[in-house]
Amino acid sequence: VVFVLTSGMRILLVVVILISATNVIPQYTEEEKKSQAFPDYMRCDACKAIAHEIRGDLGKWQPTPGQYYTTRAGRRKLKMSAVLDRIHEVCHPVPYNGLGNYAVKQGESDRVTLVGPGLPENEKIAGLTRSEKRWPLMLGVRCRELVGEAGEEEVAEAAMVEDPSHPSLFEVLCEQDCKKRSRGEL
């Protein structure tokens, strides 16, 4: 069989070859394929994404009047239960919203990297992004674990208070996972 290629077809063929040579489709390790939890090396990025989404959601949230109470001093404050409800909503991802906006990308290494709005440094990695339901679902599971481990009230307070003397949301949620990574334990 002989194929005759026009100049336009040759250009398209060259472009397809170049794209496939430069972009790597993410390939999963056995751990990544079978596990319902994030591999240890991805936990810091997962935590950063979760902290980003909790913070972002609470930042654009418009509480209803019933979600406030009045202190004895006459100040209006948000009910802790309302804040916790919002955090729980973030931890249950919806496609293309919040934690549903995260996927994986594989660059030069044999490991996949989590990418999404809360991880701008990872967006610079060359490669194809692979979106699947499992990554947002795993983020949701990890979000619930982190909130439970850190304590709901501590997470809510860290997410709402912008006082430098209080621990940040990142410090409350991610300190353990990211310390291990910075020490090279992962």
Image (tube, helix red, strand yellow):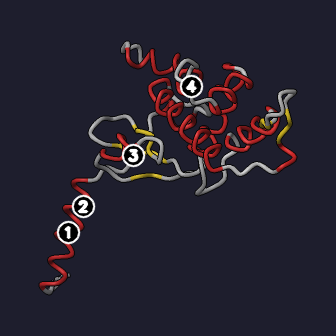
Image quadrant holding the C terminus, namely: top left
Q: Earlier in the sequence, mark 3 or mark 4?
A: 3
- On residue 15, the disc is 1
How much space separates mark 1 and mark 3, taking CA atoms?
21 Å
Which residue appears at 60% of the width and 54% of the height?
97
Q: Residue at x 86, y 37 (%)?
A: 69
| Nearest to the observer: residue 10 or residue 43 | 43
The tag earlier along the polypeptide, 4 or 1, is 1
Q: Looking at the image, is mark 1 or mark 3 nearer the viewer?
A: 3
Q: Which labelled disc corresponds to residue 19?
A: 2
Secondary element under disc 4, as helix, strand or loop, is loop
Q: Quadrant of residue 122?
A: top left
Dot 3 amino acid type: Lys
Element under disc 1 = helix
Give the labeled residue for mark 4: 163
- Residue 168 location, x and y as percent? 55, 25
Mark 2 to mark 1 CA distance (whole Å): 6 Å
Disc with the residue nearer the chain's start (4 vs 2): 2
Cα–Cα gap, marks 2 and 3: 15 Å
Q: Name the residue under label 3.
A: 105
Mark 4 or 2: in front is: 4
Q: Quadrant of residue 18?
A: bottom left
Mark 1 touches mark 3? (CB < 8 Å): no
Question: Relative to 120, is 13 above or below?
Answer: below
